[in-house]
Amino acid sequence: MGKTGYLTARIEPKLKAQAGRVLAAVGVSTTDAITMFLRQVVLRNGIPFEVRVPNAETKKAIEELESPGTRAKLKRRASTNELFADVAPRKGNQAKRKA
C-alpha cells in the first residue's frame, strides 16, 4: 500500500530536534518512528505504553534532573564502556554482595 496520507502535528522545536537526534542515532526517520507508533496503536488497540500521572516523588525527581544546576553536575562520558566502568561493581564489593 502506498503512502498517501499526511499527518500534521505541532511539536515544540526543541523536542522535535532532540527526538530527531535520537532517532537518527538508531537509524530511524521521524516518519518511520511515527508509523511504528501508529502500527502499535492498531495492534494493541490503544497506546502502546502505560500513561500515568507521576506521583509527587517522581515529579520532584524529574524537576531536579531537569534543573540547570543538576545538568551542570552530570558527568559526561565518551563511550558506553566508560559509563559501565563507572557503574560496574568493584571487585571488593562483589564479595560483600554475595555474602
Image: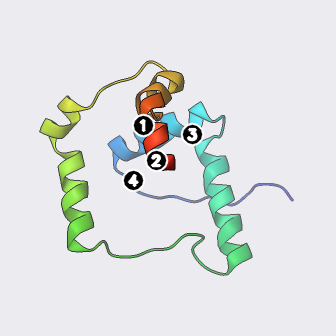
What's the residue at 52%, 27% (across, down)? 80
In primary-sequence order, the first of circles 2 and 4 is 4
- Closest to the camera, between mark 4 and mark 1, is 1
- The type of residue carrying mark 2 is Arg
Depth order, front residue of 16/65: 65
For the rendered model, the colour scheme is: rainbow
- The type of residue carrying mark 3 is Leu
- Closest to the camera, between mark 3 and mark 4, is 3
Question: Which mark identifies residue 23?
Answer: 3
Horizontal side of residue 14 vs 81, given as left or right: left
The residue labelled by disc 2 is: 97
- The type of residue carrying mark 4 is Ile
The residue labelled by disc 4 is: 11
Horizontal side of residue 20 vs 44, given as left or right: left
Depth order, front residue of 27/52: 52
10 Å neighbourhood of mark 1: few (<14), some, or many (≥20)?
few
- State the image quarter where residue 96 is shown: top left
